[in-house]
């Protein structure tokens, strides 16, 4: 949600790339996993990351900002922005571009655009962590197959690491 609830301070888990992996590995990787599940095998990635420990002095409040793109083999382009803001609001923005539609997800809203229409959905009442726990319980109680496999997590991690490398090398 986009509710101010915290502040980032040096010494905090989220202010240390070594501990948290920054917003790229802590938050972005989950969106990359979702994109891979929706769209298949990534073809290429690009990213720019403002890494808090690399450019900020200890007198400044820590922050970490990630902006990246994934081109999929099927032609879908996904844009993602995540951030550890200095104060308050979680900042995640998802954009998905296809041949006929564009989807934008931000702060509990999904907007779908095409040439002729615009549709908006409010998803802020859905808690993904609660949904994950319910799915986990169903797996135990009913032997419902797991929707996500280890290989999915490995691919998402490889994409995230490739994005870190793209940002570090400028390629």
Image (spheres, grey):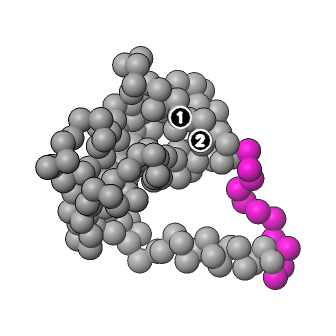
- Residue 153 at x, y percent in the picture: 66, 48
| Residue 13 visible | yes
Residue at 60% x, 42% y is 156
**Dot label at residue 161:** 1
Looking at the rendered structure, the secondary structure element under dot 2 is helix
The residue at the far left in this view is 59
Of 113 and 42, the residue lying toward us? 42
Secondary structure mainly formed by the magenta segment: loop
Q: Which residue is mark 2?
A: 157
Whole-percent x, y for residue 80 in the image: 39, 43
Q: Secondary structure at mark 1?
A: helix
Q: Which residue appears at 81% of the width and 82% of the height?
A: 141
Vertical side of 107 occupied by 4: above or below: below
Q: Outermost residue toward the right?
A: 143
Instruction: Identify the mark at residue 57; answer none if there is no mark.
Output: none
Q: In the drawing, does residue 25 fall left or right of residue 139?
A: left
Residue drawn at point x = 52 percent, y = 70 percent: 128
- Residue 139 figure quarter: bottom right
Q: Position of residue 140 (x, y in %)?
A: 80, 77
Quadrant (top left, top right, bottom left, bottom right) of the N terminus = bottom left
Res. 9 image quadrant: bottom left
Name the residue nearer the viewer: 33 or 25. Answer: 25
Residue located 39% across and 25% down the image: 168
Residue 95 coordinates in the image, percent (x, y)? 38, 44
The quarter of the picture where residue 143 lies is bottom right
Do the residues bearing badges 2 and 1 touch, measured as CB atoms within 8 Å?
yes
| Few, some or many residues within 10 Å of mark 2 (<14, 14–19, 20+) | some
Question: 10 Å neighbourhood of mark 1: few (<14), some, or many (≥20)?
Answer: some
* 65 sits left or right of 25 in the view: left
Stretch in magenta: 141-151
Quadrant location, the C terminus: top left
């Amino acid at each position: 949600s986009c509710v101010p609830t915290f502040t980032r301070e040096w010494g905090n888990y989220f202010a240390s790339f070594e501990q948290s992996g920054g917003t790229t590995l802590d938050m972005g990787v989950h969106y990359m996993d979702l994109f891979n599940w929706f769209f298949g095998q990534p073809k290429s990635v690009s990213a720019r990351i403002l890494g808090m420990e690399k450019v900020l002095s200890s007198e400044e409040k820590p922050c970490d900002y990630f902006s990246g793109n994934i081109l999929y083999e099927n032609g879908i382009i996904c844009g993602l922005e995540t951030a550890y803001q200095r104060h308050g609001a979680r900042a995640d923005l998802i954009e998905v571009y296809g041949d006929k539609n564009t989807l934008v997800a931000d702060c509990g809203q999904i907007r779908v655009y095409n040439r002729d229409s615009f549709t908006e959905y409010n998803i802020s009442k859905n808690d993904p962590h609660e949904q994950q726990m319910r799915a986990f319980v169903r797996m135990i109680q009913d032997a419902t197959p797991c929707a996500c496999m280890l290989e999915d997590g490995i691919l998402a991690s490889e994409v995230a690491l490739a994005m870190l490398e793209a940002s570090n090398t400028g390629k």
